[in-house]
Amino acid sequence: MPDGKGDRRQPPNTRRDSSGDGGAGDGAGQNGAGDAVGPGGAGFGAGRDGTRAGGSRGAGKRVDLFQAAPQNGRDLARQVLARVEADGAYASRALAAALDRATDLSAPERGLATELVYGVLRRRSRLDRALEAVADRGLASLDPAMRIILRVGAYQLLFLDRVPAYAAVHDTVETTKRTHGPRLVGLTNALLRRVSERGEPPLPDPTRDPLGHLVEACGFPEWLARLAIRDLGVDVAVALGAEMGAPAPLAMRANRLAGVSRDALSSRIAAERPDALLTPSAVAPDALLARAMDAPARTRAFADGAFAIQDVGAQLVAELCGAAPGDRVLDACAGLGGKTVQLAALAGNQASIEALDLSAAKLDQAREHARRLGVKNLATRVADLTKDLPPTAGPYDRVLLDAPCAGLGVLRRHPEALLRRTEADLSLLAAAQRRMLDVVAARVAPGGILVYAVCTFDRVEGEDVVRAFLSRHPQFRLEPPVQVPGGADWNRVVDNAGFLRTWPQREDADAFFAARFRRGK
């Protein structure tokens, strides 16, 4: 979940890079996820280890577009989009790595690259729809690279007021000439001029045709649009779809272990980044939301350990688990350790915490993350949660299982998931989640707490997994959190069934689902 959690031998496309928990932030100019692509670009079909997010490889030709050093933000964006489409790369990792390499790009060009990468991925279906409407023979005969070139051009015309139309058309035509030669220059020029003149075709009305609106306007595949309407209702589904197409804020957590309050963090960030728009979260006590803030990991405050980068929903999941002095705590899917270090902070560094992950590399980064934030009493261990833990593990007073999931709640940060996820994935993931819950439940001490969380909103991985768990483990019961002064505002985020739910359209958070269980004594 960006906490870069490792693949736990789950079904293909399992989302482990999603929740904005512990990395350096999307488009931050830092490879916070720790899985950067290698130096240099690559043509379609030239995938690299460590960046694949699932999906099929592209079959387009190698072109200069994917090999030459980017001269501007548009070039960089096209390279990253090629990596995402052809190699199955995570957009956040590929973009962060590309920005790290492009040290000569100015801040405005870096910002443009970030806007184009995420904007094209979020609006891909609308861009293709607008281009198809003005293409007499459609786009199917064009290779993947050419379609990326056209999407980047069309996005600037339809969604970026600050880019003059002539500049967008000229750049797209010149790129076509450089990468494909003169034969497609006329087509490129004609298509973009028509898009500029005619604009976007009318979109389905969300009231009269919510399904069509989610598909055409929000880019949801039809199966996901139907699922959202069925599980959430029309109003929530439409609001969620609209928000998933918008940029997510950078969410920071003030580090209590460094004696930094949220107000103090806000003052420090405002001094270092005066253009940043800072807003305290209404629900998470240590969360500060920032917009118009580039490269947070390059701030002095970050280097000093004053904050962690962590989504509001992820912060609330850790708050739901909690930790107290003297507790023995297990973070069962630690990834980069975003929630691990928060649990240490909640206990004032006086709990004994173990962090497990299948990836040794992720745990190395989790330890570095913990060192930067001043965490003590932390042990890490490689473990496969689809298998029983060793007899020496536990018992634990608190266990947090932030399980591998479909990642439908983090589409703002990872819009490429719209291209890869299928409905069939959900039942496969739920089976793995049930197994993992069985494994960790056996290690919860009598009277102890177990929290199950996923960054998705479908019932299959949420309520259905919880219901199945309780039927198999009658010694556990649901226990909603108790409101305490200065703590999380549970009244706003816990539903009538006692489940934690966060939403981008309500809390400006990733869409998390979490349940808290208490084991009987």
Image (cartoon, grey):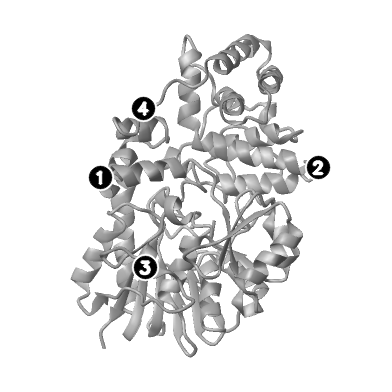
In the image, what residue occupies the spot 45% across and 67% down?
316
* Amino acid on which disc 4 is placed: Pro
Q: Is residue 188 left or right of residue 495?
A: right
Query: What residue would you read off at disc 1?
Result: 230
* Amino acid on which disc 2 is placed: Asp
The span from disc 2 to disc 1 (Cα, nearest Å) is 49 Å
- In terms of image quadrants, where is residue 234? top left
- In terms of image quadrants, where is residue 511? bottom left
Query: What residue would you read off at disc 3?
Result: 491
Instruction: Check disc 2: other Cα within 10 Å, few if <14, some if 14-19, many if 20+.
Output: few
Q: Which badge, 4 or 2, comes first in the chain's sequence?
A: 2
Q: Which badge, 3 or 4, comes first in the chain's sequence?
A: 4
In the image, what residue occupies the spot 72% across and 71% down?
304
* Amino acid on which disc 3 is placed: Asn
Secondary structure category for the residue under label 2: loop
Q: Is residue 15 left or right of residue 94?
A: left
Query: What residue would you read off at disc 4?
Result: 204
Instruction: Check disc 4: other Cα within 10 Å, few if <14, some if 14-19, many if 20+.
Output: some
* Amino acid on which disc 1 is placed: Arg
